[in-house]
Image (spheres, grey):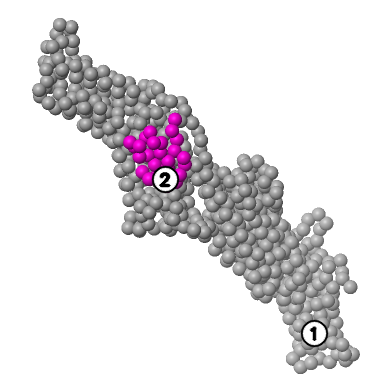
Amino acid sequence: MRTKTGFSFFSKITYSKKKPSPTIPKKGLDSSEIDHTIDNAAEIIEKWNTEYVSTTKFYSLFCESKREAKKFINGVKDLQKSMDTLIKEDPNSENLLRAQKLMQIAMKRLQSEFYQILSMNRARLDPETGEDVRLAGDSIVEVEEVSRNSMKELKSIAECMIAAGYAKECASTYKCFRKSIVDEGIHRLGVEKVSSSKVKKMPSEVVEVKMRSWIDAVSVSMKTLFNGEKTLCDEVFEGCSVSLRESCFRDISKEGALLLLGFPESVAVRDKKNPNPKKIFTLLDMYGTITENLQAIESIFSFHSVSAVRSQALSSLNRLSESILSHLVEFESEIRKDSSKTVVPGGGVHPMTTSSMDHLSRLAEYSGILVNIIVKGSSSSAKALLPKSYFNLSESDGCHHGSEVRVRFAWMVLVLLCKIDGKAEMYKDFSMQYLFLANNLQHVASRARSTGLKHLLGDEWIERHFEKVGQFARSYERLAWEPLASMCPKTEEMSPEEAKMRLEKFSECFESTCQSQSACVVPDQTLLEEMRSSIVEKLLPVYRDFYNAHSNAAMLAGTEGGWNVRYTPEDVAKYLSSELFNGKGVLEEEKSCVFRTSFGLVTARNSSRRKKRSLSCRRF
């Protein structure tokens, strides 16, 4: 039968089936020594069974007196040795029955002490910290610290109970309380069980908050909660079998770990079916969090019985990887499908260019993570999609990232550049088209040079595209400003009337050109200074020479009408050096797209009316 304490007086003792023989002291058995041992054990055991008992308060042996606790444990150990001797040499003695009763009382006391120490640890989890992951993490750290401090007491109790044959009772009490700490810790960190169907119905903002909370929760859980639990379990049951330690840790931690590491899978499935490029960074952070903690996961959950935890971590990585790849594809698709008819004033940088480069620049910060994702997820190399001369995959530029990642980024930039080429067609004026291309490519190349894209695309790629910026800028200058220079021939033979006519014509064209170009903008300061300087160098010397050679004669020819040269070389230089590209004027551009290239990533169909210029993706 079992007593109210839950222990059977005789269940831990194995008796012989033979008829008991008369008690005959055997050789080596010292009855007086055994009596003394039992008496000493009885003194401390009965003391804490009678004197320190209250219906309103639990007097903890290990809290009230460390000295008494040590004496109690040693007394129980000595009692167990005496019982072992009696079982072998005198199994029917009165001393054995007395020792059994004392052991029963001692085990009841130790189980209560074990329960009390674990309860004190459990109470450290502040229920008010659930709204703040940081505070919840601090509580978990405190709990684990308290657990480590009480490890010595727990270990001594566990060893004593297990040696007495009460391993099951000890382990059961331990599992019950430690599992509650782990489960409560996971809950306080904001992790809860949610199905994929439930996640799909959640607002994006709510899911985003849960994802961010999960990222913090994983770090706390692996570094503190599960790692601390594994350490505590190993220490408390150090002298026990591996199977006992394994079963304790499994029953305490497996469920919480699977709940924690299974959350990304539900989110990834949701986002894969409804990809949003802006959400990719949280997914990348989640992927990186698992990757960073993967070694810890494999170490902490190394037992075969918790292999499901390791498998769940890998499964979540795969799901996240698939979702991230779908977001990359959606990013490219959004660029291709952009159908806005907005003509950017002054040929400036298109919002699509700015937002796309912001996105790509930030993506480049995750290149270390994307290496694994892109390489594993690529069924065929993106290199095959690029023009042969577009991207040099040599490592001579010092870039050490995987070629697949480099090619993928080059491909995404090319998709953007081809779309920019199509947007340029929305300008009626050819010179404005080239200015638009120069401004937008300057923005692309500048962001590539100043961000992590530089290490992916390489110096050669960047320099080549800056050269193209110069080509577009020169094309703009040729169409917009070189006609003025042709009005100032170098010939010395010219009548005053002709000189006057040419100077008048130049003034009219200069005013007209300034007016037509007054709305133009060049946002990049470096490109602005280069273009102003280039236009001045091309126009001013030619006009100055013509002005110096013919202005006096022209003014004499126009004396009767009071005619005078409207613009001196200094006037021209001042405007070109300080007023050009300030964007203060207004251009009369067509509001709708007259000619648009069909979108193609390598070639674009050009209108036959525009054969004089070659604006296709081949130019990029």
Image quadrant containing the N terminus: bottom right
Is residue 610 one of those drawn in magenta?
yes
Residue count near mark 1 (Cα–Cα under 10 Å), binned few <14, some 14–19, many ≥20:
some
Front-lying residue, 148 or 189: 189
Front-lying residue, 37 or 450: 450
Q: What's the magenta region?
A: 594-619
Residue 494 placed where, x, y %? 11, 20
Task: Using the image, determine if residue 420 lies above or below residue 371.
Answer: above
Q: Horizontally, is 115 left or right of 484 in the view?
A: right
Please state which amino acid type lies under the numbered disc 1: Ile
Residue 266 placed where, x, y %? 65, 52
Marks 2, 1: nearer the viewer? 2
- Mark 2 to mark 1: distance in Å? 94 Å
The residue that mark 2 highlights is 603
Residue 431 placed where, x, y %? 34, 31
Task: Using the image, determine if residue 8 lies above or below residue 410.
Answer: below
Please state which amino acid type lies under the numbered disc 2: Thr
Front-lying residue, 245 or 204: 204
